[in-house]
Amino acid sequence: MATASSVSFNSRVASPKTIKTRLTIISDTHSHPLFSTDDASHAFRHPLPRADVLLHCGDLTSTGKIGEHQRTFSLVKSAEAELKLVIAGNHDMTLDAPFYEENWLRWHAHGGKQDIKKAKDVWTGEEARRADIVYLEEGVRTFELHSGAKFTIYTNPFTPEFCNWAFAYERDNDRFNPSSEKASCSEPGLIPSYPQVDIMMTHGPPLKHLSTTKREEDAGCPHLLRAVERCRPRLHCFGHIHEGWGAERLQWANVTDGWTEIEQVESIKTDPREVIKGRGAYIDVSRQGGRPLRFGHETLLVNASIMDVHYQPINAPWVVDLELPLAEGKG
């Protein structure tokens, strides 16, 4: 499988050489299985689109029961991908041990307390390793694929507090940005600045981007938006707000002046018939796509929630082709 290592924030240099890499992105599956192959009415059907990397942005389950974890594990395991990266979300409460120990009676009084060690082992045990599944918590990791692609990913399962769910932080708490420009990003939740991260995978969205609820409220995080502006990754994928399924291509302004703001937002259009036919919504921002994403100048945002607001799995996986750096000595 792909190899992994921790990243040195100060020594990473963006590679001038890149290679086209395909990512299949899903989120908020809530333990729902894939529909059968011959179900022509759903894009979320077997098999998931083949890719180099599968990303699951959290809400693996409904309330973190062991059986729910196992059902989603089977889904992720079935994906044809060299590397499968998974984070938790606010519904995956048995993966947030301190929260679950304090709140389990609210959710599992009738069915009984779940074994948090067993829940974690579903995603970190030997079977997961054999299936090339890597469960990621808050922080930064670097992976190298057989193709020679080497990418750094920041992951975070936490979202602003809402109705006492797991992996929550107070809305006025900035866990993504250093307290000053001179502060280091040594804490697990702090996001390194450009060009140190290629992909951000968080459970929740940033403010103002694919983050509007059915009540027309913006549930995105302003601190996360500020971190995205500072980090300028190639891709930021997330879920959490089911109504926000979609993709946007951001263009950054003033990228050489020591600060950044969004200059342009382009919504990615999809054809519903083609999405269902292809079992996914496809975006090609690689060189072969004719309009390659410019790292540092553009970022692709993807909300990959499979469930809609009524918890029906009507949304499609996103399939993204983009350029990732080649490891030194490759290519």
Image (cartoon, helix red, strand yellow):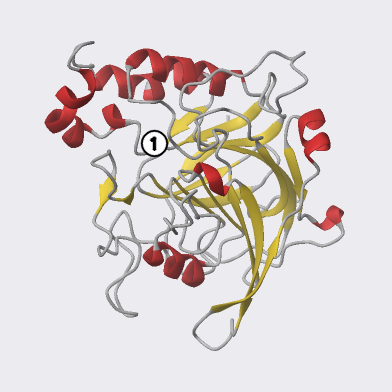
Structural crowding at the residue carrying mark 1, measured as other residues with C-alpha within 10 Å and reported as few (<14), some (14–19) or many (≥20): many
Q: Position of 6 compared to 255: left or right?
A: left
Whether 298 is drawn above or below 317: the answer is below
105 lies left or right of 228: left
Q: Left or right: where does residue 281 sit relative to residue 122?
A: right
> Label 1: which residue?
88
Residue 6 sits above or below residue 112 on the image = below
Label 1 SS: loop
Residue 165 occupies which quadrant of the picture?
top left
* Residue 258 in the image, given as x and y percentages of width and height: 50, 85
- Residue 320 place in picture, x, y as percent: 70, 46
Q: Is residue 16 above or below residue 271?
A: below
Q: Is residue 253 above or below residue 140?
A: below
In this rendering, would 68 be left or right of 235?
left
- At label 1, the amino acid type is Ala
In the rendered image, the residue lying farthest to the left is 102
Q: Which residue is drawn at the image coordinates 66% and 35% (left, top)?
A: 316
Q: Quadrant of the N terminus?
A: top right
Q: Residue at x 33, y 15 (%)?
A: 66
Residue situated in front as seen by the camera: 328 or 252: 252
